[in-house]
Image: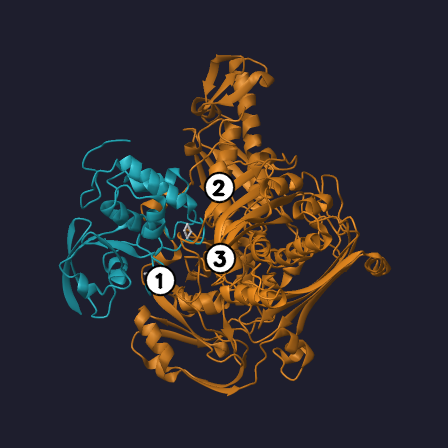
């Protein structure tokens, strides 16, 4: 019987956070610290003819002004198509042109205004379809085209065509997804100090070791001279996955001035210059037989990459899995093109391409059901993946409670009893996501060290980053469980690359699974040593011993025990003694996909389904969400309280994606870069969210757990669209689902049905 | 620079501020209380909420000079040593904290709400907190925390420093 795992645990660092003591990047300072600021391009596409920094340099209090001329010309970013400071051309609004360090923020700001940049404005390209078809404007001339990356996955070509020919029903639709942005409450920022040839970087990165590597490439200094410290992170959601150009600039400022330098984003910068979720056009074809069995799927996807590649340029990896593997479908053809434009460049955001693709696929499932006259739940259950399935991309489905989650979330679908002018309905959407790591990088590993001191205090050193999601708590629970101590006795050190072992970062919902397994293995090693030592001192067989209440005791005779601190001291305080340290590295038994996108990238997959009930005002088109039921196959809920928070937060983000969020970009410029115009849902807007954890006991997971972080936001928007359809008969294929789109749909229906309100 | 005197968390302060400096910047930069957060600097997120003369305000919208002679409570003023205010305790126990960046502002808004309405309905809580954005939690746990704190406080009015007058538990 588990003592700690499976029981609600409060957030590990909540005390610091509720008392205002937690230190975010905004709160850090250093003696002699300077303030850095970045001069950003106001134009979306222009050649830089000249930069005159002389007046800025003369301003009292300014310590350094840097432009591309002053830096080594290393390419940076995923795809090596970006630079820390741009010397010859800017490709998007917000591009970094110069960096200033000054004694205070005001002076740095003033200095920016004194820098004169002469531009030759170039025509810009802002529509990915146009960028592909018309090469007269090239974002990166040397590439000869605006196509950055293309992805193609295909089962047997003839099979796809034959299946489409045979199909009883075929649907073909275009789905349109807008720019949205993570909008973490804590904006970006970093602080750099360069002392005696060593760089220390304080950054709220989600991926400290990859970040360190990228920083070393950007700066041209060896990674062995860089230390990354993460302050408390004010939310990440994917936007803190890339090393940003400004961070390289900050490090350079610290190097040239010999003083620590800090740069913070304003909220406006956060909107314009952090990485949003990519807009997509998804042309989807779905074909089935008369009974509703899926025969084939084809998707053609165009992603607006913006001006440069970031990690976000790889999101089709994930979206493709939803097209090929959310349901059983034997014939698949998937193509995606990542297209350069002069828009802000997109990156990772919770779900990594999956919310977009799930919107298309799960809208189509409902459309198919209505075409076949089937119940949307029945159609999904008929096609749902099960344990033991191997999907067309060679993903191996292990634990799988998909059908169970669909049933839990999919009760009473369809139109609901409505009042005059208030139309109600309920819609459903499912999801698949990686739940046991994701080998998108050569390593998917995480290291852990568990150390016990002579007072019985346990320390876990882990590479795994907590950006607010609660992985620190889960890891503390796992270690406490194995060692028979309280969570309070476990201290987590997870934010300093000088101390922590390698981890590939907090992304892909991998931390509970991967870092959890590493912590579990390390703790078990220490446990083994404790048991051996205790068996010796109590003169009993090791198998008869258990760890509980900070003791090692005999299982059927708890009166025979030895206290942990005493046991540990007995190992320390003698000749030939030893320290109690266990280390482990967990890298899952998975493979990177080959060039055909075949391969089992994750040990386990997470499934889930959201059921959403809406009420639509037939007069205004305004949608009110009445409730969300979110059932998630998470293997095992290690921390039910944390899970609840993840589910509620994910659903709220998904509802925002569905209904209110859109980053409006006009000629490359974000025109609603503030919270009045970019509408995050508030406490008044978010309805009751019922989270239902469904446990499928994943054998490879720590205590049976799988990842859930991203899953919770993935199917919400599709479920809302399906609910709106159930309520009104209006099918919206473009997010966000705003009142005007609903009204327009209602008017068209009225027109068709001769004045009858559906 | 202008000299202002104000009371912050029951401590008198005299500080020099710029005429256009916000109360938020003065609290964080001059007084060194960094628990109050800056999420937008334009009155749209609520991360900077403090209580000024019993009312919650966005401190990024108040000029420091306007706070001259006023009484301010920040998140640092709620707990006494290790003893947490019931709101703080409830935010922990109900799981209302994830990244925590919105938390100080949330708690201060909730305090102002409970000070004026000790038994708010769920809808009143949601309305009272609508000026505070949270990107992590979806608000459900936050609403639960405020409800729990209202119970813990037992409906007694809090005094200016946030202490309970009597300890009725419900
Ligand atoms: S910082 Fe004041 S409301 Fe956002
Ligand atoms: S807990 Fe992260 S913004 Fe609220």
Circle 1 crowding by C-alpha within 10 Å: few under 14, some 14–19, many from 20:
some
Quadrant containing the C terminus of chain B is top left
Question: Do the CB atoms of the residues marked 1 and 2 lie less than 8 Å apart?
Answer: no
Q: Is residue A15 left or right of residue A524?
A: left
Quadrant containing the N terminus of chain B is bottom left
Q: Which circle, 3 or 1, is nearer the viewer?
A: 3
Which numbered circle lies on residue B88? none
Q: Secondary structure at mark 3?
A: loop
Q: Nearer the viewer, residue A147 or A88?
A: A147
Which numbered circle lies on residue B44? 1
A69 up-or-down from A156: above or below: below
Q: Residue at x 57, y 85 (%)?
A: A123
Subunit that carries the residue with mark 2: A
Residue A657 position, x and y percent, is: 52, 59
Question: Do the CB atoms of the residues marked 3 and 1 lie less than 8 Å apart?
Answer: no
Determine if the C-beta at disc 1 is less than 8 A from ligand 1. yes
Kindly indicate the quadrant of the structure image that contains residue A144: bottom right
Q: Secondary structure at mark 2?
A: helix
Chain B drawn in what color? cyan
A185 up-or-down from B63: above or below: above
Chain A drawn in what color? orange
A307 up-or-down from A217: above or below: below
Residue A533 position, x and y percent, is: 53, 21
């Amino acid at each position: 019987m588990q003592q700690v795992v499976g029981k609600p645990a409060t957030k590990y660092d909540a005390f610091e956070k509720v008392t205002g003591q937690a230190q975010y990047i905004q709160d850090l300072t250093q003696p002699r610290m300077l303030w850095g600021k970045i001069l950003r391009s106001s134009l979306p596409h222009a050649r830089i003819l000249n930069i005159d920094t002389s007046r800025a340099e003369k301003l009292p209090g300014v310590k350094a002004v840097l432009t591309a001329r002053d830096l080594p010309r290393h390419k940076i970013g995923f795809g090596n198509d970006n630079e820390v400071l741009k010397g010859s051309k800017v490709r998007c609004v917000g591009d970094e042109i110069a960096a200033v360090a000054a004694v205070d923020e005001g002076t740095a700001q003033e200095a920016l205004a004194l820098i004169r940049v002469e531009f030759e404005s170039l025509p810009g390209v802002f529509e990915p379809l146009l960028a592909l078809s018309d090469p007269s404007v090239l974002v990166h001339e040397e590439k000869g085209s605006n196509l950055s990356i293309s992805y193609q996955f295909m089962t047997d070509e003839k099979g796809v065509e034959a299946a489409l020919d045979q199909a009883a029903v075929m649907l073909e639709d275009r789905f349109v997804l807008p720019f949205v942005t993570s909008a973490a409450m804590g904006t970006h920022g970093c602080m750099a100090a360069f002392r005696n040839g060593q760089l220390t970087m304080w950054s709220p990165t989600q991926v400290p070791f990859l970040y360190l590597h990228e920083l070393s490439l950007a700066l041209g200094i060896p990674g062995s001279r860089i230390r990354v410290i993460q302050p408390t992170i004010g939310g990440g959601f994917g936007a803190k996955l890339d090393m940003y150009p400004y961070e390289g600039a900050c490090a350079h400022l610290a190097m040239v001035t010999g003083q620590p330098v800090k740069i913070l984003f304003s909220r406006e910068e956060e909107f314009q210059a952090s990485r949003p979720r990519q807009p997509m056009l998804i042309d989807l074809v779905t074909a089935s037989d008369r009974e509703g069995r899926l025969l084939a799927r084809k998707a053609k996807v165009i992603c607006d990459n913006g001006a440069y590649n970031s990690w976000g340029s790889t999101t089709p990896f994930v979206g493709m899995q939803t097209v090929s593997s959310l349901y059983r479908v034997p014939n698949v053809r998937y193509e995606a093109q990542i297209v350069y434009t002069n828009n802000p460049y997109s990156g990772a955001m919770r779900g990594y391409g999956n919310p977009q693709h799930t919107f298309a696929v799960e809208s189509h499932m409902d459309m198919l059901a209505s075409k076949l006259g089937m119940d949307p739940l029945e159609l999904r259950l008929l096609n749902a993946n099960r344990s033991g399935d191997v999907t067309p991309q060679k993903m191996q489905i292990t634990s799988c409670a998909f059908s169970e989650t669909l049933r839990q979330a999919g009760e009473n679908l369809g139109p609901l009893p409505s009042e005059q002018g208030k139309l109600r309905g309920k819609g459903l959407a499912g999801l698949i996501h990686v739940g046991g790591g994701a080998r998108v990088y050569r390593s998917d590993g995480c290291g852990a060290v568990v150390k016990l001191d002579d007072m019985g205090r346990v320390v876990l050193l882990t590479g795994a980053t907590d950006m607010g999601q609660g992985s620190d708590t889960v890891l503390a629970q796992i270690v406490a469980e194995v060692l028979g101590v309280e969570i309070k006795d476990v201290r987590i050190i997870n934010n300093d690359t000088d101390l922590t072992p390698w981890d590939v970062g907090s992304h892909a919902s991998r931390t509970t699974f991967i870092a959890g397994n590493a912590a579990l293995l390390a703790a078990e090693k220490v446990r083994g040593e404790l048991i051996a030592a205790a068996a010796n001192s109590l003169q009993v067989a090791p198998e008869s011993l258990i760890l509980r209440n900070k003791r090692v005791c005999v299982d059927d005779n708890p009166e025979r025990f030895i206290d942990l601190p005493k046991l540990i001291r007995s190992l320390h305080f003698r000749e030939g003694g030893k320290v109690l340290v266990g280390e482990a590295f967990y890298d899952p038994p998975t493979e990177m996909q080959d060039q055909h996108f075949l391969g089992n990238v994750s040990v386990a997959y997470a499934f889930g389904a959201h059921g959403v009930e809406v009420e639509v005002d037939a007069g205004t088109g305004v949608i009110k969400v009445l409730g969300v039921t979110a059932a998630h196959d998470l293997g095992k809920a290690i921390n039910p309280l944390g899970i609840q928070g993840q589910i509620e937060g994910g659903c709220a983000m998904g509802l925002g994606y569905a209904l209110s969020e859109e980053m409006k970009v006009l000629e490359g410029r974000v025109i609603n870069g503030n919270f009045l115009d970019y509408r995050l849902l508030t406490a008044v807007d978010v309805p009751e969210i019922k989270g239902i954890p469904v446990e499928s006991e994943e054998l490879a997971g720590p205590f049976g757990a799988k990842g859930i972080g991203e899953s919770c936001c993935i199917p919400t928007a599709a479920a809302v669209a399906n609910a709106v359809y159930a309520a009104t008969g209006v099918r919206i294929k473009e997010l966000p689902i705003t009142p005007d789109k609903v009204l327009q749909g209602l008017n068209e229906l009225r027109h068709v049905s001769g004045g009858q309100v559906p | 620079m202008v000299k202002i005197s104000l009371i912050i968390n029951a401590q008198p302060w005299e500080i020099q501020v710029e005429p256009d400096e916000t109360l938020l910047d003065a609290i964080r930069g001059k007084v060194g209380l960094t628990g109050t957060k800056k999420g937008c600097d334009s009155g749209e997120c609520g991360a900077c909420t403090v209580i000024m003369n019993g009312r919650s305000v966005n401190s990024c919208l108040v000029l420091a000079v306007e706070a001259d002679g006023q009484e301010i409570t920040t998140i640092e003023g709620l707990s006494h040593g290790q003893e947490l205010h019931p709101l703080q305790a409830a935010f922990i126990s109900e799981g209302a904290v994830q990244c925590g960046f919105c938390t100080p502002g949330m708690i201060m808004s909730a305090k102002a709400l409970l000070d004026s309405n000790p038994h708010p309905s769920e809808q009143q809580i949601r309305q009272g907190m609508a000026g505070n954005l949270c990107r992590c939690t979806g608000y459900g746990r936050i609403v639960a925390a405020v409800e729990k704190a209202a119970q813990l406080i037992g409906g007694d009015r809090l005094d200016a420093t946030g202490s309970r007058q009597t300890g009725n538990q419900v």
